[in-house]
Amino acid sequence: MLLSKKITSKLLNGTLASIGFILSPLSWWNDLVVNFPLSYIIALPFGLLNQKLFIPAFIVAYWLTNIIGLLLIHKGSQKLFNPNSQTKNQILNTFVWGSIYTILIIILVLSGALSFPSEFLKKIN
């Protein structure tokens, strides 16, 4: 019974760390394949309510997907490899990197690289 509990714990924490890696800014492909689509889907209802809400909702959703990813990596790895480790500096690093990525998204929005879906359709026509 105890062995089964340890294996279950390792599987759960390994899964958390894996999902976190997929969401985190540590993987080079996550923005295009995971975080941008998730952020877009989350922001779309806000944009349909009011077009001015789309970009702020997109930025917040993008920031949260990255932060959640880093926190999942942290939590899963901590419990998997060293349950007694200190977490204060790692959580601070998570918020610093999340803020850096937020600034990058704001730059993309201000440069016109990211816009509301109707703006994409206008560019095509």
Image (spheres, rainbow, N blue to C red):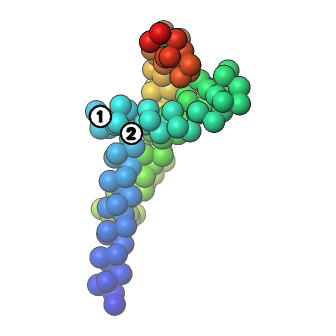
Can you see residue 104?
A: yes
Kindly identify the amino acid type of the residue bearing the numbered disc 1.
Answer: Trp
Give how far across and how far down residue 76 sits, in percent.
38, 58
Whether residue 106 is visible here, answered yes or no, is no
Disc 2: CA contacts within 10 A as few (<14), some (14-19) or many (>=20)? some
Q: Residue at x 49, y 17 (%)?
A: 120
Farthest residue to the bottom: give it: 1
Closer to us: 15 or 83: 15
Quadrant for the N terminus, please: bottom left
Residue at the spot of label 1: 29
The front one of 37 and 107 is: 37
Earlier residue among tags 1 and 2? 1
- Give the vertical position of 11 relative to 41 (above or below): below
Contact between labelled residues 2 and 1, with CB atoms less than 8 Å apart: yes
Q: Amino acid at mark 2?
A: Val
Mark sitting on residue 34? 2
